[in-house]
Image: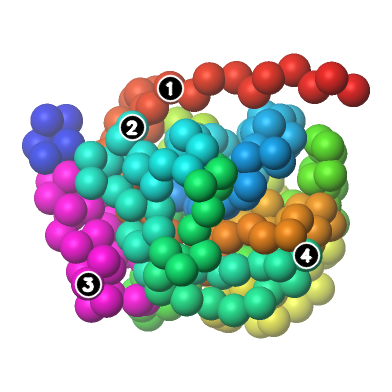
């Protein structure tokens, strides 16, 4: 697909899907739902924690590749989509209080505060169309399932109150597909890039492939190996440790849908992000 056509298709997909989400007509996981669009993980925090979380993302670019940061109190994200509203345009949100999950909801207008800052982080769903186009099958998409995610034993770099283990997503593949996928994903640095582990789940602390911490279990077939990518659910582990009064995230697998074509990320293009202010510590 020519790049201009890819950009047009992605925007049409995104606008249509966000409209359904906003009207309450779509509240499902988004793997394969907008295959040509950049998808993202979401974290919303009070502004006094925003700089520390920004530094946490910069210190951990593999699981937390920043795509956008909102202005305090502003629910818009114009660098990702002209009509995006942080309060209504994610299929399913999670509301945390003091680090504990309070509830899930499809609309956060009732808890929105004037000092909230939204962060959107890259998502591995953004490279899946490229894998499929190169003949690499993805079973969770074939079965209309969410990708399985696991809490690993890989530690992240702390920043302020934020720290914790890396979460990883898993896709079963034949070895020849796994190495081809790694080469393709290397071009998607802002969607987690290359895998963090190929073939050895126990090396990163995953003991049971059929018992994911998030998402849905996807079995390995004969001859397949597990392939693990860093995952943007990682901040939800850091939130449990930081224990802010309130934090809002996407539910794992229910992603932010942007207007940006996934092929734009692969080409090294995407929204610019300012650096976090230096810590006073």
Q: Are marks 1 and 2 in contact (CB under 8 Å)?
A: yes
Q: Which residue is drawn at 52% across and 65% down?
A: 111
Give the secondary structure at mark 3: loop
Give the secondary structure at mark 4: loop
Residue toward you, 17 or 101:
101
Q: Is residue 217 above or below residue 117?
A: below
Dot 1 alpha-carbon crowd within 10 angstroms: few under 14, some 14 to 19, many 20 or more: few
Residue 212 image position (x, y, % from top left): 67, 76
Marks 1 and 4, how far apart in space? 31 Å
Q: In this view, does 100 lie above or below 189?
A: below
Give the labeled residue for mark 1.
272
State which tag comes first along the sequence, 3 or 1.
3
Q: Which residue is drawn at 90% across and 23% down?
A: 281
The span picked out in magenta is 9-37
Give the labeled residue for mark 4.
98
Residue extending farthest right: 281
Q: Are marks 2 and 4 in contact (CB under 8 Å)?
A: no
Marks 2 and 3, how far apart in space? 23 Å
Q: In which quarter of the view is residue 141 placed?
A: bottom left
Query: Which mark is nearer the camera, 2 or 3?
Result: 3
Identify the colour scheme used.
rainbow
């Amino acid at each position: 697909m020519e790049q201009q056509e890819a950009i047009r298709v992605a925007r049409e997909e995104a606008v249509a899907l966000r409209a359904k989400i906003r009207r309450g007509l779509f509240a499902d996981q988004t793997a394969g739902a907008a295959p040509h669009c950049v998808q993202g993980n979401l974290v919303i925090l009070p502004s006094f924690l925003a700089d520390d979380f920004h530094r946490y993302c910069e210190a951990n670019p593999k699981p937390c590749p920043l795509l956008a940061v909102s202005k305090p109190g502003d629910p818009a994200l114009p660098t990702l989509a002209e009509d995006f509203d942080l309060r209504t345009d994610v299929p399913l949100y999670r509301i945390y209080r003091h680090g504990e999950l309070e509830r899930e909801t499809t609309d956060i207008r009732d808890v929105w505060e004037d000092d909230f800052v939204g962060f959107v982080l890259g998502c591995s769903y953004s490279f899946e169309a490229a894998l499929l186009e190169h003949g690499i099958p993805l079973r969770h998409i074939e079965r209309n399932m969410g990708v399985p995610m696991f809490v690993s034993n890989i530690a992240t770099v702390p920043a302020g109150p934020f720290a914790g283990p890396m979460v990883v997503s898993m896709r079963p593949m034949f070895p020849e597909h796994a190495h081809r996928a790694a080469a393709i994903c290397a071009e998607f640095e802002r969607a987690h890039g290359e895998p963090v582990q190929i073939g050895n789940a126990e090396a990163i602390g995953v003991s049971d492939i059929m018992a994911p911490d998030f998402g849905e279990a996807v079995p390995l077939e004969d001859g397949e190996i597990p392939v693990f990518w860093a995952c943007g659910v990682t901040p939800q582990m850091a939130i449990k440790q930081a224990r802010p009064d309130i934090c809002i995230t996407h539910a794992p697998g229910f992603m932010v849908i942007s207007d940006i074509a996934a092929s734009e990320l692969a080409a090294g293009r995407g929204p610019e992000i300012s650096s976090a202010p230096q810590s006073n510590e």
